[in-house]
Image: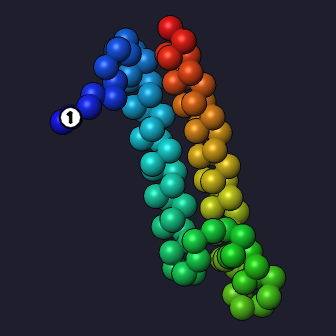
Amino acid sequence: MKIDFYQGFDPEAAADIERLSRLIYELRQNRARILQPYEVSHESELVRRIADGKLDEHPAYEHYLSARILADTCESVRMVLAGRLRQEKAA
């Protein structure tokens, strides 16, 4: 049985939700691509390896900062998406 997630949403809301969901996906994928060469799953592991001297600061620290920015942006977009979903549920 196929469930239409967007059933009941007006077309503009459905498009907004789809765009926000896609953005979250792309942010997560890009963060994973940055961390993958270091074989870590979280930026805190990357910065720990830098601090322990296991990795050279350059370019690892720049990659750490990039991963942090992507993670923070992803969380911000997730909050916007949650608000948009609540808004649609209340309508």
Q: Give the residue drawn at x 52%, y 51%.
A: 27
- The three-letter code of the residue at mark 1 reads Lys
Which residue is painted at 57% across and 71% down in the image?
41
- Asked if residue 17 lies left or right of residue 65, the reply is left
The residue carrying mark 1 is: 2
> Where's residue 2, x and y in %?
20, 34
Name above or below for residue 57 compared with residue 9. Answer: below
Instruction: Please provide percent x and percent y for residue 19.
Output: 42, 32
The correct choice, above or below, for 73 with respect to 50 in the image is above
> Outermost residue toward the top?
91
On the picture, is 51 further left or further right than 27? Answer: right
Q: Examine the rendering and report whether any part of residue 50 can be seen.
A: yes
Image spot of residue 68 (x, y percent): 68, 58
Q: Nearer the viewer, residue 1 or 39?
A: 1
Residue 86: quarter of image: top right
Which corner quadrant holds the N terminus?
Answer: top left
- Image coordinates for residue 80, horizontal then vertical, percent: 60, 30
| Badge 1 density bin: few <14, some 14–19, many ≥20, Cα 10 Å | few
